[in-house]
Image (cartoon, grey):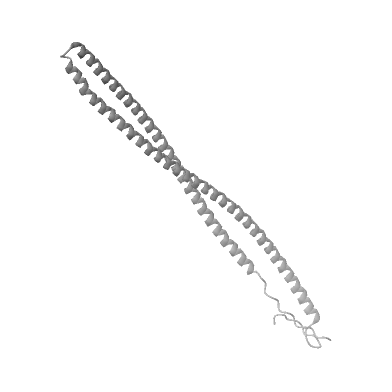
């Protein structure tokens, strides 16, 4: 028998034995209930701590997400700046090509003036006055053309040098910015991956804790046999 009660004189069980058993069972149930309540409070406290940590981690993830969005915006701005620089470079190349055409035109003009100077030299044999005048005119024209060509060449060389310096500086700045943005995006991605793994581990731990608490539900105690009236 699970509950060895002494038999009463008129049948049934001894009343005092039953009362002692009920008192003992009640005390044991009260102690077990107190222990379970303590475990429940501890589990609730742990769950609160886990919830707080989860909230902090979610806030950190939100911060990292905003930082990643900011880096992506910076990267888009860098790309736009690079495209604008390329457009500017193309425009400068077109302008340089135009200057080169103007230089070639002036050079052709100088070459066209050379026969005219030679013609004035030929007139020199006819008359000294005409020869001197022709020579002066030809020399003046040649000097003007040479001066214009030298001035144009000097201006063109200065402009090309300035364009090359600006282009090199812009390219260095763009490359540095793109490299920094890519490095920051890679770091943000690694942090997000670590956060996701940590949250997954915490979900598993919380599920295990909930399952362990459910397994602590006590079995129901069988009801005692009713007492018979004397």
Residue at point 38% right, 32% down? 163
Left or right: where does residue 35 sit relative to residue 228?
Answer: left
Q: Which residue lies furthest to the left in this view?
A: 125
Q: Residue furthest right?
A: 230
Position of residue 114 measured from the top left corner of the image (x, y, whole percent): 22, 23
- In the rendered image, the vertical position of residue 155 relative to residue 11, given as above or below: above
Left or right: where does residue 134 sit relative to residue 97?
Answer: left
Residue at point 64% right, 66% down? 213
Viewer-proximal residue among 111 and 77? 111
Residue at point 72% right, 66% down? 34
Position of residue 110 measured from the top left corner of the image (x, y, whole percent): 25, 25
Picture quarter containing residue 102? top left
Q: Residue furthest bottom?
A: 10
Viewer-proximal residue among 61 and 147? 147
Picture quarter containing residue 171? top left
- In the rendered image, the vertical position of residue 8 relative to residue 101, given as above or below: below
Viewer-proximal residue among 20 and 198? 198
Position of residue 87 measured from the top left corner of the image (x, y, whole percent): 40, 40
Position of residue 9 measured from the top left corner of the image (x, y, whole percent): 81, 87
Image quarter in which the N terminus is found: bottom right
Residue at point 57% right, 61% down? 203
Left or right: where does residue 21 sit relative to residue 168?
Answer: right
Picture quarter containing residue 216? bottom right
Image quarter in which the C terminus is found: bottom right
- In the rendered image, the vertical position of residue 199 relative to residue 167, given as above or below: below
């Amino acid at each position: 028998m699970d509950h060895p009660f002494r038999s009463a004189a008129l049948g049934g069980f001894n009343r005092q034995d039953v009362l002692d058993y009920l008192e003992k069972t009640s005390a044991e149930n009260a102690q077990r209930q107190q222990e379970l309540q303590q475990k429940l409070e501890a589990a609730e406290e742990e769950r609160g701590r886990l919830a707080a940590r989860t909230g902090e981690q979610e806030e950190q993830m939100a911060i990292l997400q905003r930082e990643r969005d900011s880096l992506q915006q910076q990267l888009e701005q860098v790309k736009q700046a690079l495209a604008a620089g390329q457009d500017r470079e193309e425009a400068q190349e077109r302008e340089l090509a135009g200057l080169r055409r103007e230089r070639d035109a002036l050079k052709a003009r100088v070459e066209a003036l050379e026969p005219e100077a030679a013609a004035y030299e030929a007139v020199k044999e006819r008359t000294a006055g005409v020869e001197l005048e022709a020579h002066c005119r030809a020399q003046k024209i040649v000097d003007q053309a040479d001066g214009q060509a030298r001035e144009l060449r000097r201006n063109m060389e200065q402009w090309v040098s300035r364009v090359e310096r600006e282009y090199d500086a812009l390219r260095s700045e763009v490359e540095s910015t793109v490299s920094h943005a890519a490095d920051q995006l890679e770091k943000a991605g690694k942090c997000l991956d670590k956060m996701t793994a940590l949250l997954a581990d915490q979900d598993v731990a919380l599920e295990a804790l909930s399952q362990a608490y459910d397994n602590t539900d006590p079995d129901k105690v069988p009801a005692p046999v009713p007492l018979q009236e004397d």
